[in-house]
Image (cartoon, coloured by chain):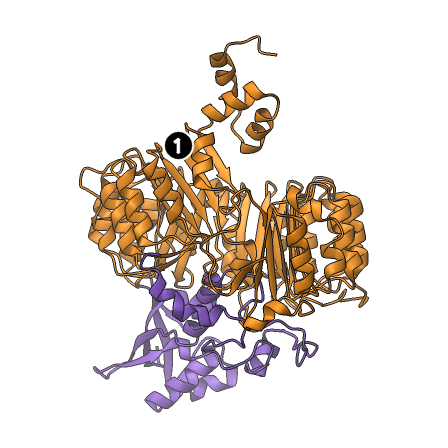
Amino acid sequence: MGRGGSTSSSSSLESSNYPALTSRSSSLYQQNRDLSTDLRLGLSISTSQQGNPSIPSESDWPPIKPILKKELAAEENECNSATFFVKVYMEGIPIGRKLDLLAHDGYHDLIRTLNHMFNTSILWAEMDGDEHSEQNHVLTYEDKEGDWLIVGDVPWEMFLSSVRRLKITRADI
Amino acid sequence: MNYFPDEVLEHVFDFVTSSRDRNALSQVCKSWYRIESSSRQKVFIGNCYAISPERVIERFPALKSIALKGKPHFADFNLVPHEWGGFVYPWIEAFARNRVGLEELRLKRMVVSDDSLELLSRSFANFKSLVLVSCEGFTTDGLAAIAANCRCLRELDLQENEVEDHRGHWLSCFHDSHTSLVSLNFACLKGDINLGVLERLVARSPNLRSLRLNRAVPFDTLQKILMQSPNLVDLGVGSYVHDPDSETYDKLVTAIEKCKSVRSLSGFLDVAPHCLPAFHSICPNLTSLNLSYAPGIQGGELTKLIRHCRKLQRLWILDCIGDKGLEVVASTCKDLQELRVFPSDPYIGHAAVTEEGLVAISSGCPKLHSILYFCQQMTNAALITVAKNCPNFIRFRLCILDPTKPDAVTQQPLDEGFGAIVHSCRGLRRLSLTGLLTDQVFLYIGMYAEQLEMLSIAFAGDSDKGMQYVLNGCKRLRKLEIRDSPFGNGALLMDVGKYEAMRSLWMSSCEVTLGGCKTLAKKMPRLNVEIMNENEQTDFIFDDAQKVDKMYLYRTLAGQRKDAPDFVWTL
């Protein structure tokens, strides 16, 4: 009845009890995630679930509405592709670069990339005392309020929420 | 008995609004039946196949508002084959033909075609309210018809429907003179929306109190809409990705501060990290918060938000809040009545909350009466503690992601834990169980769960005795749904009369055979016993010993339904 019929034939495949025909290639309880991520997040890897014949098929367990399941799966995929590009200038060089902050997992990673990108070694808030003399440049950032601050004082997530752009200035301030 | 004229009785009956109470009234005597039936305006039909539309119209000539439910509950989890049924068209067609003065229609788990919506929109001049929950079969073209033709429409509420989106022109179909909107919820639509049309619609709707946007509505439109509608009571945020331009963000903060009436918040379908603080100013007024569709909000941010929500009564969230986050809920939300915690990572089969979160909530929130909790593990000790802390549960639904997992500490079945729940919660009306469970838990349920009306069982029990305990003991049982449990014909046929006192029974992947179902159908002509088999073998119908994949039976006055698809046999 009505025009809804044309959509239902394709989705009837999804709702059948045959092995799930979803886009994910993993079966429900296969651990194909990055295990180091699991450990870092403090998650335990359950072995009891693997190979258990009574675990229900992916399409009807756990009992949450398909529309919610789709939203959550979509977010999973998006998380892996989110980006946050900011401009980076080095003092004295008029042409800047752009850098994806979300492709880095913390300050150390960021400094490493910048050191490489600008072929220098960069000072930031958390460096040890004896390394200071070695650094030619300092990494600073402009926050949402327009103030310039040294990078590294606040937690990484907080930094991500307030940074607008980066600047590498000479160390002799 | 009748010391009063009919008009007086009718006036008294006007104060009785719940369907159950009115059903009770109508059974007192013949004249009360007559008066009640001729004056009832709001009708609830729990199973659209239990009765024909014509009979409903005949009995309730003053009908103005009707709620209908179609597919069985397990259809929510893909267990019911797609073309099973639950069509609303015959109902609308019958109402139109009989010139029912329909004003409100509420549908749950039904198939709603564009033709139905078109017919609905043209047939009832005073139509005011359309609420569709978990329905399917329609497109935005059907919505366009509703928008264009229902000139008195006050409410269009689409909750979790599967809608084929033909892009945003349906909103433009609301006439410029349409200023009566009170409630508009299109959060489940996937497609784009004409933002200018939306803004103008909101601007000309001074009575708008509830607005839930979809993910196509961006941050700056949200800000403009909130400036237009400071009297909103219920807000569903669509996309919440703020752009680095802080001016829009500041404007939003100002707009939100003006919305002093907002009591209910939901949505955040797309979220950029760290911009929730804009909402902190309305959090102290919130009584309802639904962030189950916001997987983009990290646990820490969630917790920070909730710390401001001291008046919360209803909370739906994802498990990324963690046990620690639930402790924050427990210490902040002392008025909490209903909690739902959904798994944010359903495909991996790992939940981020355990029994600890549940125990924390139970000890911190004395008014808690409804819970739906997806978790990684559970223990008997935790359930016993929860039962002691919260004897007022009306609904208790626990879903352990590994459905046959035993007590995480003792490795014992969870019989004792659930037994404590039913023993302590005398008013329990709805229960869902998971975990390693033997027949013993059903003995407890049969013994103690006197008010139980709905029971959902998955992967539980050892033998027919389990189901028998329940059927024997739970006098108020109305809906029983069972999957993947070893209950067979012995249980099914033990008390066949019971099924006429219930709305429905669902059994899938159990031990019942075709022969058992045939026997039942033969004994009980006023039940529809429907069988669904995946294999579609035509010789199936002759092999009585074969197990039935899916059986759904329900009491009915309408006889066998005529719209069943090929794979459904009514015995």
State the quadrant of the C terminus of chain A.
bottom left
* Picture colour for chain B: orange
Q: Residue at x 34, y 32 (%)?
A: B101
Q: Secondary structure at mark 1?
A: loop
Residue B140 in the image: x percent, y percent?
A: 29, 55
Q: Give the side of residue B322 with respect to residue B102, left or right.
A: right
Please provide percent x and percent y for residue A34: 55, 82
| The quarter of the displayed image where residue B208 is located | top left
* Front in this rendered view, residue B248 or B462: B462
Q: Is residue B251 visible?
A: no
The residue lying toward the viewer, choosing from B346 and A79, is B346
In the image, farthest residue toward the left:
B176
Q: Is residue A85 visible?
A: yes
Give me the residue at 40% from left, 37% from top.
B261
Q: Give percent across and percent down for residue A18.
A: 54, 75
Report the front residue among B510 and A69: B510
Residue at numbered disc 1: B64
Q: Residues within 10 Å of mark 1 (few under 14, many from 20)?
A: some
Specify whether B272 is left or right of B45: left
Q: Amino acid at mark 1?
A: Lys
Give left or right: position of B511 versus B179: right
Residue B23 in picture, x, y percent from top left: 57, 30
Give the vertical position of B215 relative to B236 (above or below): below
Chain letter for the purple part = A
